[in-house]
Amino acid sequence: MDHQEIAIKSVPSEGGKRILNEKPLLEPNEGKGGGKKGPKPKQQNGATDNAQVQGAEKVEKISNAELKKRAKAEKAARRVQEKQGKQQPAPTEAKGSKNSEVGPDSARRGSVASVPATPIAKGPPPSHHKPTGPIQKPLPLRQISSQAPTPAIQPKKDSKKVALFGHLYGQPRRTTIAAAGRDVHPAVLALGLQTSNYVICGSSARCVAMLLVFKRVIESYVTPPQNSLTRHLTSHLSPQIEYLVSCRPLSVSMGNAIRWLKLQISDVDPDTPESKAKADLCNAIDNFITERITVADQVIATSAAEKIQDGDIILTFAKSNVIQQTLVEAHRRGKKFRVIIVDSRPLFEGKRLARALADLDLEVQYSLTHAIGHAIKDATKVLLGAHAMMSNGRLYSRVGTAIVAMMAKESDVPVIVCCESIKFTDRVALDSIVTNEVAPPDELLFQGESATPLAAWRESPNLQLLNLMYDVTPAEYISMVITEYGSLPPSSVPVVHRLSTNT
């Protein structure tokens, strides 16, 4: 037994493969047949040789396949340790030397116990496949400094347009002749500025002024070579109309007049000389103004003046040319009556009507719309002008008209509308939101006063100014509509419109 222990202890503790290569006790294939025997170690005496032989027979023989298998396992274990890095400490030499010592009892158990074991790190079982890619290490995370300045959030720009009427906001009104087209006539340039600044105000007045300006445009027109007057004159009027629209939207009467004028131009005989054709068009414009506006106003004023009786108190809103003619005609006939004028900002059109009537020695009372409740108590009739009459019988007029008509209806005061047929349209209006005109909001400010609360309204957040020009009065608030065709209910407006346009 002493000789066996000496033989086993002489094996170095670096691994089983190295033990067998340096000092093999037996050949790996010995005892299986056909294997060659290696050279035997030198024997000192017979007793020692016999003891070594007996100890070697007791040690189980190890094949080459088992050696390769153990070598692969050791190699895989080392790779696993490299992947895990320094997460676990490497085994100490003391543990390795302890495991390398094999006693006589372990030699009797088998070949696995007779070979020193290699310490394997704890973790997942070793893989027997060779990794193909490089070893990946976890990428370092970039540390975000808490002291980095955060970008400042830009506040949303406060819109000064009322969202409900956003579809009505177009290009700002033109207040100068800058950037006007070279084809625009000088008379058109002047008219555009006058309408934009309310020098010429009122649907009928604007229509007459436009037709007179177009008359001057036709008189100075010269047909280009290889063109006809019928085709080219219509296109020549287009830039004139576009400039007027940029200054202020066209009224219903202006639109009807433009359609009539284009129809007259298209009816000109191509064989007619240019001078005669232009003269005929200018005469047609004069006749149109006389028949459809001037004479129509006189007929309406005469008919409406008959509705005024002695002792009546007539209430009207703002200023209408045909209403002024009606009151003047009734006064000329010697009727005794009193007039209440209700006005509103920002145009204060009623002031001009009050001055004109006061100069005729008429008794006039002037108040604003906030006093309509008190003023309507004394009124016996309400006379209203019109910007347009819609096909559904509704009145489209200066903003504030609907309030006056509603208060009159509540007080059982008849409401009479005086309107020329040129202001009739086949369009339908249910409210004053879809179709309207938005004037510049700065007109609501008091002129010449910079210390008013609204002076810096553009810099005030959540503050918007809305300056609507017109409103819609329901047909049930209107008792009668007086036109040049006679007195009729609001429901007959589309009939009169067809008669006036011959369609």
Image (cartoon, rainbow, N blue to C red):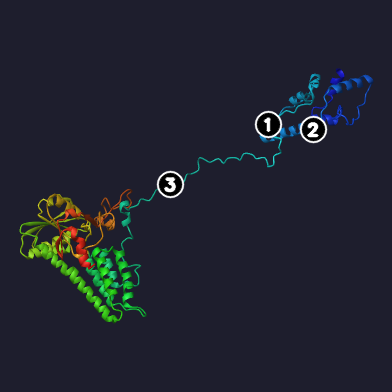
* Residue at x 78% of width, y 33% of height: 68
* Residue at x 76% of width, y 23% of height: 98
How many numbered markers are drawn? 3
| Residue annotated with mark 3 | 153
Which SS class for mark 1? loop
Do the numbered discs 1 and 2 sit on residues whose CB atoms are within 8 Å? no
Give percent across and percent down for residue 292: 19, 69
Cα distance between the residues tagged 1 and 2: 21 Å
Left or right: 150, with 364 as reference point? right
Which SS class for mark 2? helix
Q: Residues within 10 Å of mark 1 (few under 14, many from 20)?
A: few
Mark 3 residue type: Ile
Residue 202 visible within the image: no
Name the outermost residue toward the right. 45
Q: Name the image quarter holding residue 209.
A: bottom left
Do the numbered discs 3 and 2 sit on residues whose CB atoms are within 8 Å? no
| Residue annotated with mark 1 | 125
Cα distance between the residues tagged 3 and 2: 73 Å
Residue situated in front as seen by the camera: 69 or 491: 491
Q: Specify which label sits upstream in the sequence, 1 or 2.
A: 2
Q: Specify which label sits upstream in the sequence, 3 or 2.
A: 2
| Residue annotated with mark 2 | 65
Do the numbered discs 1 and 3 sit on residues whose CB atoms are within 8 Å? no
Which SS class for mark 3? loop
Cα distance between the residues tagged 1 and 3: 55 Å
Q: Specify which label sits upstream in the sequence, 1 or 3.
A: 1
